[in-house]
Each structure stands twice: as C-alpha cells, then as structure tokens.
Amino acid sequence: MKIKSPFFLLFVFILCGCATWMAVGGNYKSASENYAVELPEGWRKYNPAKGKLLITKDGFTLQRIQITRAKSDTKLMHTKKRFEKGMLPQEAAEVVIDNLRSNPNILNQNIIENKPAQVGGHPGFKIVYTYQNKSGLNKKGVFYGLLTRNWWYEMIYEAPERHYFAKDLPTFEKVIETFRLIKDAAA
C-alpha cells in the first residue's frame, strides 16, 4: 500500500522527532520552577508541559514520579474547591483529597494517611491513598504538597499496589528528602 499523503509523513516525523524522553540521575535544577532535587539513576524523564516533571523507570503504567508547580490560585481539575493564600497545610490537603475523590477516572478511592510533613524544609502534607483505575488495576500513591504564598508544589508517586509500589517507594522517599526550593518560599 502506497501512502500518498504528505500529512501522514509529517505526522510520523512529528511523532518520532518530538520525543522528549531523557535519561536522568543526580542533581536536577529547574530555575524556572524554583526547585532542585536529586533524581534517581536509571530513570527517564518526560516534560509534557511547563511546570511538570514526570519520571519513570519502567513506564508510566508501572511507576511514575511527578513534580508539578502551579500558581497557588490555579483551578484543580476535579473539584470546585480552591487553594487560598494563607491556607494551612492540612486545609490544602483537604482540597487535594476532594480533587482525588471527585476524579471520575479513578474508582474506590481510599485515603490511608493524611498528615503534616516537611517538604523542602517547609510545612506541607503527605497523603497516602489507593484506588482502582477503570481497567480494574489497583494502584497506590503518595502525594506530598506544599503551598507557598504564590505557588503550589505537588510531588506524587503512583504504582500498581501489588508489586511496584513497595519496590520503588524508597526511591521516591529519597527524591522527597532532596527536594528544596531555590529561592525563598514566600516568593
């Protein structure tokens, strides 16, 4: 079969030429997002959008670490609740939990833990949760959040609950331990 459309060739070129996968390991600094972190050796990163870093070792369906920064007044996707300037970490955690519970793409959400946590030396929170995706796969996640005066940071680790979650959780915890803001959190 002969393909005559130049649009098909352009599509294939774009699809192959725009891959942004890159091996990571060691110090990662994002001056534009105002944070630095140590990324695990042997993992790969993908930056799909400004403000978001995604890394995986074996593929996003098997494990994913995500670090995101957004304006503190950014509307969340699945809830009408919003972050407010001056909000306490546990109040921000409740907004995140409502967003998780309102997500129609995840089923049987269960919040296992919701507690205060230090994130980059600043007061934040940690949520541990489980859910089932629409394919029936049980997943587990850990969500660290930090709300500064102008910015919202989230660090998420998710993996299938049965094998991968426990396997790569220590790697994620090391990432969290090294996370720091470059400039003052009030900025």
Image (cartoon, grey):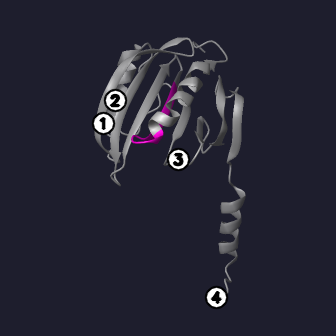
Of pointers 4 and 1, the one earlier in the residue sequence: 4
Percent across and percent down for residue 18 are 69, 55
Amino acid type, callout 3: Phe
As measured in the structure, the alpha-carbon distance from the residue carrying label 1 to the one carrying label 2 is: 6 Å
Of pointers 2 and 3, the one earlier in the residue sequence: 3
User: Which residue appears at 34% of the width and 29% of the height?
Assistant: 97
Which SS class for mark 4? loop
Which SS class for mark 2? helix
As measured in the structure, the alpha-carbon distance from the residue carrying label 4 to the one carrying label 1 is: 48 Å
| Quadrant housing residue 50 | top right
Which residue in the structure is indicated by mark 3?
60
Nearer-the-camera pick, 42 or 72:
42
Q: Does the magenta segment cover residue 131?
A: no
User: Which residue appears at 46% of the width and 34% of the height?
Assistant: 166
Which residue in the structure is indicated by mark 2?
97
Amino acid type, callout 4: Met
Q: Residue furthest toward the bottom?
A: 1
Percent across and percent down for residue 92 are 39, 21
